[in-house]
Amino acid sequence: LGAALVPKRKTKDIDKIKKIFENTGLGIKKGDEIHYPILLRKTHQTTHSTYIFSLPLGLPSEKFDSLLPAIEEGLNKECSSEFEDGVFKLRTYNEKLPASWKFNESLLNPDTWMIPIGKNHDGILYHDFDKYPHMLVGGVTRFGKTVFIKEAFYSLLMNQMDNAEFYFLDLKGGLEFGKYIGLPQVKAVASDIYESAEVLGEIVQDLNNSKQLYRQKGYTNIVDTPIKTRKFIIVDEGAELAPAMMKAKEMKKYAEFCQAALSEIARIGGGLGYRLMFCTQYPVKEAVPMQVKMNIVARLSFIASAQVASRVIRDENGAEDLPGIPGRAIYKIEKNRIVQVPYIDDKYMFDQMGARGNDINQCSQSGSGPDDHRPVGDGNRKTSSWNP
């Protein structure tokens, strides 16, 4: 009875990690022995601990990555990992990421094309659209995708009032972004596939004109030119433009054009100043054109409904294992980083834009006339010179 009342010794994290390796078979079998990752060293700091392992030859680092959910559950801690300089680094954190945090003006980077992606254990991550011009965003509905689009739009608008132009393909009937059509920086808001085709037809024509100008000037990339304007094409619910999902022959024809136009923008638009943000809550291969995906390095995935959805956005599993926290996402460029995206709402945006109303409405838009600010998607679609 006395022995039963003695508290059991608490199992160390490293012992739990090693046991997880054994229980999941994370090793290489040689004869009758199984060789597991070997701990080289560990360090402990106030906020986190780092464990550095050497991996047995033949054991890919991706298998280690796939164990992160099991390690997090076993330790009851959030973790991150990376394979670098021939060793695998596992970091465990003493505090969890906040379940939510609000956007504020300190996150803006005036005169840059940088937006805050989110907060992780190492600080706030930013995405630079002049370095990585396009982004692919996916995840199930109500977990932060549209909030992120608004945060990106607001950050770019406030950072570059004189130089940012926006073209929204808001395929939820224009309900999310139609309210911004009064801003001079918002050139078009398309609310259905027909209006999307019209907007994209005009953008492709503009892109072709830009190619001619660049050839005449000897330009190769906008970042090396005196041109300051960047044109953002933001697609909210790209699956609505998938030809495979169209039953009517006419709609399929429009959808094929839209996907071809988006592919052209993704393929050559980056160097000409066009930035594509392609977002969908149905990340299946039919919804994301291959040319779009192949030409986008930056990926942001909120929780996915299945492994296949995670692979479409990120080319690997993992997004399906994210916790069900709105705003929690995986940001991927050279490596995966779990972030909590800041929350922003329409009221905050309108309040801040109202406070700077004169700055927004009086910004110079060289070479533009009254019709250049006409929003598409107001229910009175005009006949375009483009014909699918």
Image: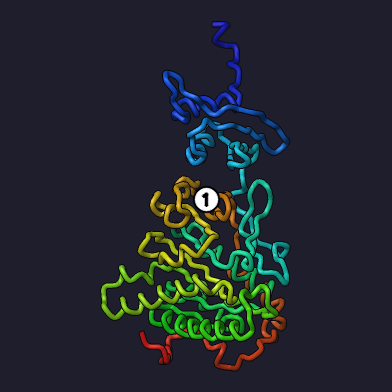
Amino acid at pointer 1: Ile
Asked if residue 200 lies left or right of residue 186, the reply is left
Task: Name the quadrant of the C terminus.
Answer: bottom left
Number of marks drawn = 1
Residue at mark 1: 325
Q: Position of residue 315 (x, y in %)?
A: 45, 53
Quarter of image, res 106 = bottom right
Residue at 26% of width from left, 78% of height from top?
A: 249
Taking the image as shown, residue 367 lies to the left or right of residue 325, namely right
At a point 49% along the width and 57% down the height, the residue shown is: 143
Q: Is residue 28 above or below residue 6?
A: below
Q: Work out whether 320 lies above or below 142.
A: above
Whether residue 286 sits left or right of residue 26 in the image: it is left
**Residue 112 vertical position relative to residue 50 in the rendered view, above or below:** below
- Classify mark 1: residues with Cα within 10 Å, few (<14), some (14-19) or many (20+): some
Measured as percent of width and height from the top left, residue 247 is found at 26, 73
Where, quadrant-wise, is the N terminus in this rendering? top right
- At horizontal 55% and vertical 60% (from top left) the residue drawn is 298
Residue 183 visible in the shown view: no
Residue 38 x/y as whole percent: 58, 27
Position of residue 184 measured from the top left corner of the image (x, y, whole percent): 61, 84
Horizontal arrangement in the rendering, residue 139 relative to residue 360 (left or right): left
